Image (cartoon, grey):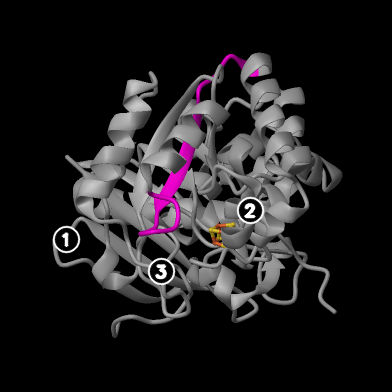
Amino acid sequence: MSTARSLHDLSFPELEEELAQSGVKKVHARLLWRALHYEASRFRENLDGFPPPLARWLNQYLGDGRAFFLDQPEQVAESRSSDGLTRKYLLRLRDGRTIETVLMGYDRRFTACVSTQVGCAMGCVFCATGQMGFTRHLRPGEIIAQVLHVQRILRAEYGKNLRNLVLMGMGEPLHNYDAVMKALSTIADVRGPSLAQDRITISTVGLVPAILRLAEEKSPYNLAISLHGATEEQRRSLIPISKKWPIESLIDACRTYEQALGKRIFIEWTLIAGKNDSPEVAGQLASLLQGINVHINLIPLNPTDAYEGTASAHQAGLVFQRILRGAGYPVTFRQRRGIDVAAGCGQLRSTKTTVP
Ligand code: SF4
């Protein structure tokens, strides 16, 4: 089995250390780091421009059959929504597995939605990724590589940088906690991709111990909880994994998080006709969240093959929103994007939807 490692998996101190072990001055680590995370598209061209000790190190250690490789997934397909605002990339990883990354543009501001696992173990009934089952976690480098991929496209086509990042693609980010945190510290590093920490959002279905860990570690990122049910029974019918962490413990963890970090939590609520969109449920949700600083996002259900539920009627959604607003909560309808190319929330499945 190959023991080769990805240079993109390394933190900056780890990269410094690797170079130092081979006698390359630590000062060169900064150059290499920038090339890896900022100018990754021109990495090979830059090789000649590197100081000789660094170029020699790369020639010796980087490449097939050597100690290190780069995470540069191959783009297998691109699908564009009919309004041109959403693009979905199917990327092939080194082991042949594929993942999806979505790029959304709003007023020339761009948000990427990246995957953190191949498949997902949480099994949410309305989600195409959950319907696939779990294959494996992504490494930090594989998460970072998705950001670099869309950054390259944005710079080439618009001369722009990515503005927001959401971890709402394939997988449950907090199930892959360490890799996600390591990737995010690189993505937010000012010497690298340099995304502002408060423009990064981690989304979870509610892994209570991991939420408490975020609070303890003073996570600088935003947190979104996919709640979808206001009672134990309702939540379990949509999110099987929630049996492990009852709704009360999830709400307690949200309180702890909010008190520890003083940050508003985003509550994601998929509106499913006849399932969780009644005025009664809106009232239950309002009581459940009482005293917590939240912003509620309502998302009409996006269709997937294996779930027969349908999106709530517009009027039902408006009533739901009005009740929550009446109870004092900020509530917005999340714009539905990329539904025609299966790039909406819960639709990612790593299949080709169009020919490249
Ligand atoms: S909604 Fe998120 S956590 Fe649930 S199955 Fe889909 S990817 Fe996994």
Helix, strand or loop at mark 3: loop
N-terminal of the two: label 1 or label 3?
A: 1
Task: Let me know if residue 266 is in the magenta part.
Answer: yes
Q: Nearer the viewer, residue 271 or 144?
A: 271
Q: Residues within 10 Å of mark 3 (few under 14, many from 20)?
A: some
N-terminal of the two: label 3 or label 2?
A: 2
Q: Residues within 10 Å of mark 1 (few under 14, many from 20)?
A: few
Q: Is mark 3 within 8 Å of ligand 1?
A: no
**Quarter of the image containing the N terminus?**
bottom right
* Disc number placed over residue 309 in the picture, else none: 3
Q: Is mark 2 within 8 Å of ligand 1?
A: no
Percent across and percent down for residue 182 are 68, 42
Q: Is residue 328 left or right of residue 333?
A: right
Task: Let me know if residue 271 is in the magenta part.
Answer: yes
Q: Which residues are magenta?
A: 261-277
Percent across and percent down for residue 265 are 52, 28
Q: Is mark 1 within 8 Å of ligand 1?
A: no
Q: CA distance from mark 1 to mark 2?
A: 40 Å
Compared with 201, 308 (above or below) is: below
Q: Amino acid at mark 1?
A: Gly
Helix, strand or loop at mark 1: loop
Residue receiving disc 2: 233
Residue 342: image quadrant is: bottom left
Q: Residues within 10 Å of mark 2 (few under 14, many from 20)?
A: some
